[in-house]
Image (tube, helix red, strand yellow):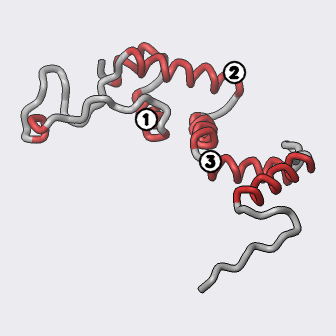
């Protein structure tokens, strides 16, 4: 279905659906435009470059709308939350911030010591021992 019909069924606007798509809050488009569409011919009922909304798209937007309402967050905040969950670098920086401002408890010293010992074992070292020099 076209964007106007999808927006009507979801109780939102086409503009908001385009915004959600730009934020990455919709499933990816499964069908890239065919070469025939690029050559100026269109498939019946589909304009080139226009997203067709399926039931999966509607379900994803409906879920996002529910999360936004339940937790009082914007679409942009929800998109950032997804980014935190999927990008390890972003997750690490947000966790560091959380620890620094006291929203996330620091790792227990015992866990940090375990990780240090594990890293040393992986490097072939024992605690307190210097790495062997490689012959040149």
Q: Are marks 3 and 2 in contact (CB under 8 Å)?
A: no
SS under mark 3: helix
Nearest to N terminus: mark 3 or mark 1: 1
18 lies left or right of 120 = left
Report the residue that reaches farthest toward the bottom.
136
Residue for point 7% across, 41% down? 39
Residue 99's label in the rendered image is none
Percent position (x, y) of residue 103? 86, 43
- Which quarter of the rendered picture does the C terminus lie within? bottom right
- Residue bearing the label numbered 3: 88
Label 3 and label 2: CA atoms lie apart by 26 Å
Above/below status of 132 relative to 92: below
Between residues 29 and 116, which one lies in front from this camera angle? 116
Between residues 112 and 12, which one lies in front from this camera angle? 112
Q: Which of labels 3 and 1 is toward the front?
A: 3
- Residue bearing the label numbered 2: 70
Q: State the image quarter where residue 55 is shown.
A: top left
Percent position (x, y) of residue 33? 20, 35
Residue for point 67% across, 46% down? 91
- Local packing at callout 2 (Cα closer than 10 Å; few below 14, some 14-19, many 20+) is few
15 lies left or right of 124 = left
Above/below status of 133 relative to 116: below
Residue for point 45% across, 30% down? 26
SS under mark 1: helix
- Residue bearing the label numbered 1: 21
Label 3 and label 1: CA atoms lie apart by 23 Å
- Local packing at callout 1 (Cα closer than 10 Å; few below 14, some 14-19, many 20+) is some
Residue for point 44% across, 26% down? 13
Label 1 and label 2: CA atoms lie apart by 21 Å
- Which quarter of the rendered picture does the N terminus lie within? top left
């Amino acid at each position: 279905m076209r964007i106007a019909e999808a927006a009507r069924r979801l109780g939102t606007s086409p503009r908001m659906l385009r915004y959600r798509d730009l934020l990455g809050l919709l499933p990816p488009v499964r069908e890239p435009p065919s070469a025939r569409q690029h050559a100026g011919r269109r498939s019946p009922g589909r304009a080139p470059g226009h997203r067709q909304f399926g039931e999966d798209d509607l379900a994803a937007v409906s879920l996002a709308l529910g999360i936004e309402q339940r937790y009082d967050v914007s679409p942009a905040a929800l998109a950032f939350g997804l980014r935190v969950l999927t990008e390890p670098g972003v997750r690490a920086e947000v966790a560091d911030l959380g620890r620094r401002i006291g929203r996330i408890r620091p790792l227990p010293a015992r866990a940090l010591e375990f990780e240090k010992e594990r890293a040393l074992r992986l490097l072939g070292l024992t605690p307190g021992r210097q790495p062997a020099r490689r012959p040149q």
